[in-house]
Amino acid sequence: MPRIHFQLQLAELKDKLLAMAALAQQAVETAVDAYLQRDLGLCQYVKQNETAINSAQRELDEMAYELLAKEQPMAIDLRFILAVIKINGDLERIGDQSMGISRRTRDILKTNADEVELPVDFAAMGEYSGRMIRTAIQSLLEGDARLADTVREMDDEIDRMNRRAHTDLLKLIQDKPQFTHQAMNGLMVSRSLERIADHASNIATDVIFWIRGADVRHQLSLSMD
């Protein structure tokens, strides 16, 4: 009976983590929409969402640490709880990065800067980052380490998109310095989306640790040297 109770608690922990993941994913999508549409109402929604994410993070951490202290789990159950704690942190940071995008939108609206079409496909970057989050969470839901591998492989593309955005926006600043403010905001939005993708990759890495018991954090970087 105690073992059954423990498994039920693990299932509840996983459900809570998936619910928080949904909040984080929604935060990214809404923040990107707010930036593209220059919508202050969507910015406010992102802020409310972050409050919910922070609250969920505290609740999840408390539950995970309590399970570690009381149940003293072994092997795969221990790895799962440790992975939940780390994934929880990455989801909270995704919320933070979404707030960063929202702040860029607020800054644009506050300064009443002239609209300029920046040479960056932010919609594509946002969609790609969102797909990485969805795939990472799906790998968690299904306990699929191979699916998690694909998320880590996707990270190279968002890095490439961010580098291209950086190059193109700096060129815009050189050619048309009157648009420096808008371009700087674009640089920060691009960087936030790249960081969101990094957190999705971290989540995938923790899924692999849970399933395989392997630490692959530096595997891709070593293979590229």
Image: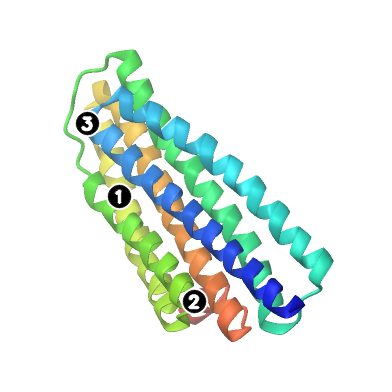
Cβ atoms under marks 3 and 1 closer than 8 Å = no
Mark linked to residue 37:
3
* Mark 2 closeness class: few <14, some 14–19, many ≥20 residues within 10 Å: few
Residue identified by numbered label 1? 126
Q: Helix or strand or loop: what does disc 1 sit on?
A: helix
Cβ atoms under marks 2 and 1 closer than 8 Å = no
**Image quarter in which the N terminus is found:** bottom right
| Residue 190 appears in view | yes
Residue 164 locus on image (x, y percent): 28, 52
Give amino acid for label 1. Answer: Gly
* Mark 1 closeness class: few <14, some 14–19, many ≥20 residues within 10 Å: many
Residue plotted at (35% across, 69% down): 154
Spatial separation of the CA atoms under disc 2 and disc 1: 23 Å
- 27 to the left or right of 20: left
Q: Nearer the viewer, residue 147 or 219?
A: 147
Specify how the rendered protein is coloured. rainbow
Residue plotted at (66% across, 82% down): 76
Q: Nearer the viewer, residue 6 or 164?
A: 6
Q: Earlier in the sequence, mark 2 or mark 3?
A: 3
Give amino acid for label 2. Answer: Leu
> Which image quarter: residue 27?
top left
Q: Closer to us: mark 2 or mark 1?
A: 1
> Residue lying farthest left?
117
Residue 101 locus on image (x, y percent): 39, 36
Q: Is 74 placed above or below 58 here?
A: below
Residue identified by numbered label 2? 220
- 131 to the left or right of 87: left
